[in-house]
């Protein structure tokens, strides 16, 4: 029994690390996403039945794939130690809930959309991007807070100066900040500027200084923080791969050492058995 378990463990590890298996999983996820898209159209009954059975096969494949990864992890504790495995397991489990024909059919379709997010686990590069995005949120929050202060100050100034010119754009501080967001995105901002320059010819200074701060300074600061986080996450991912390779090498060396000891013990036993006959 132990030998069968060991063989199953080794087989699942080899299959899980097989590039063909990984790309097959990617193809199945894409196929599942296309099936969800086809359901949004008015299709004949034959196609609907075909999509239903295809969805059933895809769900079965996802279940088998997760089970293989559980076996390859060695234990459930090792499997659920990774947050990505927990995320993937929840998505697959939700897909198994039979609520398609119930009053929660719409909810079932919405939950199946999360299958597309399984690409995040399957493709390592996507995992690096998402991990970097999660880690960069605290850093970006300080830049966003500074941007809010700039928006608020400029919004208050715009409300005081331009309220009588166009109350639709500068009626209160909230609307003024929305107008400034339009200016920051450079969407027809010149129309807003020329309207106020009729009464305030130097109001262009107000707009250009705001665009310089929001669209150039703070935006580039955010990009710099994100790039730094991506580099850190990429280096961390490379370090994990190196550690895994070192652990595998150490395990192989330990097995070789164990085999050598066993061979040496067998030789010693054979020598002891031959000594009395001599």
Image (tube, rainbow, N blue to C red):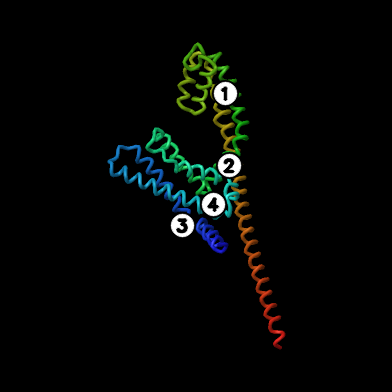
Query: Which residue is drawn at the image coordinates 53% and 43% (left, top)?
Result: 87
Which label's residue is closer to the chain start, 3 or 4?
3
Label 4 crowd bin: few (<14), some (14–19), many (20+), radius 10 Å: many
Q: Nearer the viewer, mark 3 or mark 4?
A: 4
The earlier-in-sequence mark between 2 and 4 is 4
Disc 1 vs disc 2: Cβ atoms closer than 8 Å?
no
First in sequence: mark 1 or mark 2? 2
Report how far apart the C-alphas of labels 2 and 3 lie in the structure.
27 Å
Instruction: Between label 2 and label 3, give the one nearer the viewer.
Output: 3
Q: Residues within 10 Å of mark 2 (few under 14, many from 20)?
A: many
Q: Would you say residue 166 is visible in this rendering? A: no
Question: Whole-percent x and y of residue 198?
Answer: 48, 15
User: Which residue was labeled with disc 3?
Assistant: 20
Q: Marks 1/4: CA distance?
A: 50 Å
Which of the two marks, 3 or 1, is nearer to us in this view? 3
Disc 4, SS? helix
In this rendering, position of residue 276 left or right of residue 195: right
Q: Quadrant of residue 128?
A: top right
- State the residue position of label 1: 151
Q: Which residue is mark 2?
A: 132
Question: Whole-Å distance between the Cαs marked 1 and 2?
Answer: 27 Å
Locate the N terminus by quadrant.
bottom right
Circle 4 residue:
70
Q: Is residue 169 left or right of residue 133?
A: left
Q: Decide: marks 2, 3 in contact (CB < 8 A)? A: no
Q: Going 55% across and 59% down the picture, which residue do you hit? A: 9
Q: Give the Cα distance between marks 3 and 4.
A: 19 Å
């Amino acid at each position: 029994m132990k030998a069968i378990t060991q063989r199953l463990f080794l087989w699942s590890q080899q299959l899980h690390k097989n590039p063909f298996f990984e790309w097959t999983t990617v193809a199945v996820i894409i196929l599942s996403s296309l099936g969800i898209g086809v359901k949004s159209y008015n299709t004949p009954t034959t196609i609907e039945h075909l999509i239903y059975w295809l969805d059933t096969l895809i769900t079965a494949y996802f279940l088998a794939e997760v089970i293989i990864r559980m076996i390859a992890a060695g234990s459930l504790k090792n499997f659920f130690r990774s947050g990505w495995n927990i995320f993937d397991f929840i998505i697959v489990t939700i897909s198994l809930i039979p609520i398609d024909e119930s009053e929660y059919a719409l909810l079932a379709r919405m939950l199946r959309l999360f299958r597309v997010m399984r690409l995040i686990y399957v493709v390592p590069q996507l995992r690096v991007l998402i991990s970097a995005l999660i880690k960069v949120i605290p850093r970006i929050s300080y830049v966003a807070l500074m941007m809010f202060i700039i928006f608020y100050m400029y919004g208050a100034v715009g409300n005081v100066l331009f309220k009588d010119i166009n109350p639709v754009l500068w009626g209160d501080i909230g609307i003024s900040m929305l107008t400034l967001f339009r200016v920051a995105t450079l969407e027809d901002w010149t129309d807003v500027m020329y309207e106020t320059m009729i009464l305030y010819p130097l109001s262009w200074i107000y707009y250009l200084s705001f665009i310089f701060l929001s669209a150039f300074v703070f935006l580039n600061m955010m990009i710099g923080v994100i790039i730094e986080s991506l580099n850190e996450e990429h280096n961390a991912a490379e370090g994990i791969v190196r550690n895994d390779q070192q652990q595998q090498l150490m395990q192989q060396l330990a097995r070789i050492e164990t085999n050598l000891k066993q061979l040496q013990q067998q030789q010693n036993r054979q020598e002891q058995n031959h000594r009395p006959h001599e």
